[in-house]
Image (cartoon, rainbow, N blue to C red):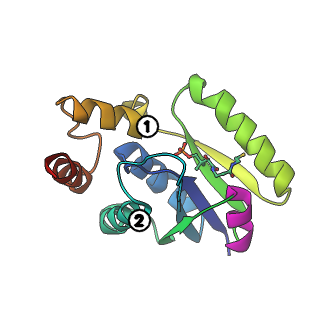
Amino acid sequence: MRRAIFPGSFDPLTNGHLDIIKRSAPLFDEMVIAVLNNADKRPMFSVDERCEMIREVLPTVETDGCKMSVESFSGLTADFARTSGATAIVRGIRAVSDYEYELRMALMNRRLEPTIETVFLMAGEEYSYVSSTLMKQVFELGGRVEGLIPELVEAKMRDKKLA
Ligand code: PNS
């Protein structure tokens, strides 16, 4: 049984995240989308809202028989991976600029949990500039984000803006 976690803030889920989920699913039997409960940041969506959105959107993604689930976590990713019984941590790399940060995290996670490997997947080039932070910024300022985030997420962002 090959189980992986795909950790992140997912504030909010983007099509870049979905691309990584689609690409990594065939490599594993089970994958937990691990949503960080980052209380010290001020997220646009609560951790429960983020988990719910991912659960709603996941059925639209081709996951090639990989059993998907969504869970929130606090604390160390390495600890969550171990207690989940995962042997891999999946992370997406968009551009060279991601590499340094991701390398530091991967090496630290390996030091914390030597049996768990980080698996890097290259995001599709059409998502190479897509980040949750950029999506929120462009949306807030009235720019178009269609095709870069799931429609459901865009609708929830609109609701937040109106609220
Ligand atoms: O989507 P993000 O914000 O790039 O995800 C970053 C995340 C959640 C993977 C990273 O911040 C993380 O692992 N946080 C949990 C705390 C932790 O384990 N820190 C040490 C990482 S080496």
Locate residue 149 relative to residue 146 in the image: left or right: right
Measured along the vertical axis of the image, is residue 83 above or below residue 23? below
Mark 1 or mark 2, whichever is nearer to me: 2
Q: Distance between the residues labelled 1 and 2?
A: 23 Å
Whether 75 is among the magenta residues is: no
- Magenta part of the chain: 76-84
| Depth order, front residue of 43/82 | 43
Q: Is residue 28 above or below residue 117?
A: below
Viewer-closest of 83 and 40: 40
10 Å crowding of disc 2: few (<14), some (14-19), many (20+): many
Amino acid found under the numbered disc labelled 2: Cys
Residue 79 percent across, percent down from the top left:
73, 63
- The residue lying at 42 percent from left, 31 percent from top is 125
Percent from the top left, x then y, of residue 120? 63, 43
- The mark found on residue 51 in the picture is 2
Distance from mark 1 CB to nearest ligand 1 atom below 8 Å? no
- Horizontal side of residue 127 vs 20, given as left or right: left
Give the quadrant of the N terminus: bottom right
Tell me which label, 1 or 2, sits earlier in the chain.
Answer: 2
